[in-house]
Amino acid sequence: MTDTFTADAGTDVCTWTSTTDVPSNVLTGTRVRLTTTTTLPAGLALATDYYVIKLTDTTFSLATSYANAVAGTAINITDAGTGTHTV
């Protein structure tokens, strides 16, 4: 799976830019890694495992562990970053 997303620093919610390549099995607890063409949103890092908190078919938050994802404890995103971000 690879697809692009945007991040909202006010809500810590990420939105898929397109869901074309997002499989339906991206559920809460799915482990992912992020890439970007410039700078990831503040609070997120490259070469780091994150866990999806699925909110809707088009929105999600990220957690630092599987346990945090299941508990709904999202990472605090403090800015939207720049460039194109990919999960």
Image (spheres, rainbow, N blue to C red):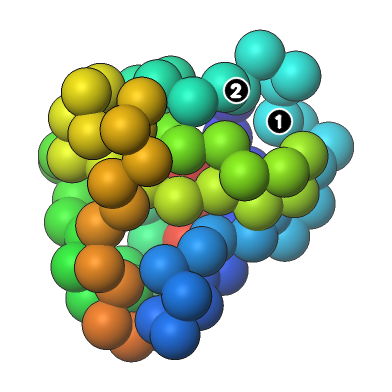
**Closest to the observer: 20 or 58?**
58
Residue 86 in the image: state x and y as whole percent.
49, 50
Give the quadrant of residue 5.
Answer: bottom right
Residue 22 is marked as: 1
In this rendering, would 27 be left or right of 46? right
Mark 2 highlights which residue? 26
Residue 66 in the image: state x and y as whole percent.
25, 22
Q: Residue extending furthest right?
A: 20
Residue at the location (17% across, 56% down)?
Answer: 45
Residue at the location (25% across, 57% down)?
Answer: 75
Relative to 41, does residue 47 appear above or below in the rendering? above
Residue 30 is marked as: none
**Closest to the observer: 72 or 60?**
72
Residue at the location (33% across, 85% down)?
Answer: 79
For the image shown, how many numbered marks are present on the structure? 2
Q: Residue extending furthest top?
A: 25
Asked if the residues shown at circle 2 and circle 1 are in contact, with their CB atoms under 8 angstroms apart, the answer is: yes
Residue at the location (45% across, 51% down)?
Answer: 61
Amino acid type, callout 1? Val
